[in-house]
Image (cartoon, grey):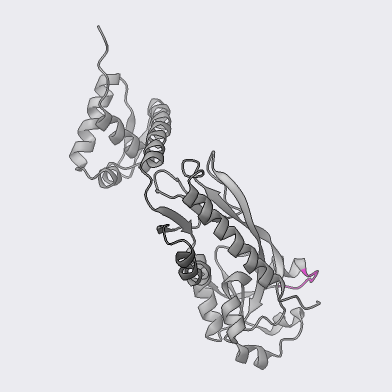
Amino acid sequence: MARPKPSLNALRAFEATARLRSMTAASLELSVTHGAISRHIRSLEELLGVPLLVRTSSSTDPTPEGSRLAEGLTAAFNLIDGSVEQILPGPLTVSCSATIMMYWLIPRLAAFHEAHKNIDLQFNMNYDQVDFIRDKVSIAIRSSTIAPPKDVVIKELAREWISPVCATSYAKANRLQKPGDIANCRLLGTRTRPEAWSDWLDELGLRQDVRIQESYEHFYLLIQAALCGLGLALVPTMFVLEEINSGRLVAPFGSIPGKRRLMLWTAPHVATRPESRAVSHWLMREMSTTANMCAALGSVDA
């Protein structure tokens, strides 16, 4: 006699719960009630004859057997979703950090839409790891410090260039002429790159203590602080080219190549789509132009 097979709904409910470590989160993702998730998982455990989850007051964790089942189910559902995306492709979704979106991508979108009227784009704000299937992302711009997903198509966009920048009035008041003059400045940084100032000094061959007076969560906040005259901010040059060209900010020591590179990740299930190739080609061309503009700022000898 054939053994009963678990229902697809039960497998979906368990996979989401094991991945999210929460029945509540799973119910929200699948748009069903908490009770339905619980019943599906209970029926699956009864059918398989093994406990799949360990429930505590603060979390729901898979057992060893549950972990093995969840791993296989996640891969299987990703394969199903990817296959459907290939047959019924929707708009391409580009994922990048909010700062890249604000200062680099949005200012170029009008030109993109003018050149590619038949391509619809959606956007995902994220700068960390990404699940292309679950997050419905097609293309991602990421730092080379972030580990890419398995099977993703990877291309290098450009090397990152770094510049200390400040308001024009701040540069004049502090008589910024050479990199060593930062000793007299209020240094601004980001919490995600606490060693950025030390790395910049190392690249210039300078040895001096660094004290960050103010640290911000995101580069767009750091740039705003510099615009408001709060101090000298160290930022990727690509974010502030427009502000430098307009005179709202100055880069008193120019720009130097940083340690990081920007990478382009493309989901394997959309990599061969003509629209995906067009977007990738456009991003690479625009980023190359931006990198050349950053390099053209030059640098000041230490």
> Which residue is at a point 67% across and 92% down the rendered structure image?
172
Q: Is residue 181 above or below residue 11?
A: below
In the displayed orientation, state which residue is furthest to the top. 1
Q: Is residue 85 left or right of residue 282?
A: left
Q: Position of residue 201 (x, y in %)?
A: 74, 70
In front here: 172 or 290?
290
Q: Is residue 135 above or below residue 190?
A: above
Q: Position of residue 91 (x, y in %)?
A: 39, 53
Tell me the quarter of the picture where residue 287 sits: bottom right
Start and end of the magenta stretch?
204-209
Q: Is residue 223 above or below residue 37?
A: below
Prevalent SS, magenta region: loop
> Which residue is at a point 76% across and 73% down the rendered structure image?
208
Magenta stretch contains residue 220 = no
> Which residue is at a point 52% across and 54% down the rendered structure image?
278
Q: Is residue 234 visible?
A: yes
Tell me the quarter of the picture where residue 168 sits: bottom right
Q: Position of residue 23 (x, y in %)?
A: 28, 41
In front here: 111 or 229?
111
Q: Position of residue 39 (x, y in %)?
A: 20, 32
Q: Is residue 213 left or right of residue 37?
A: right
Q: Is residue 236 visible?
A: no
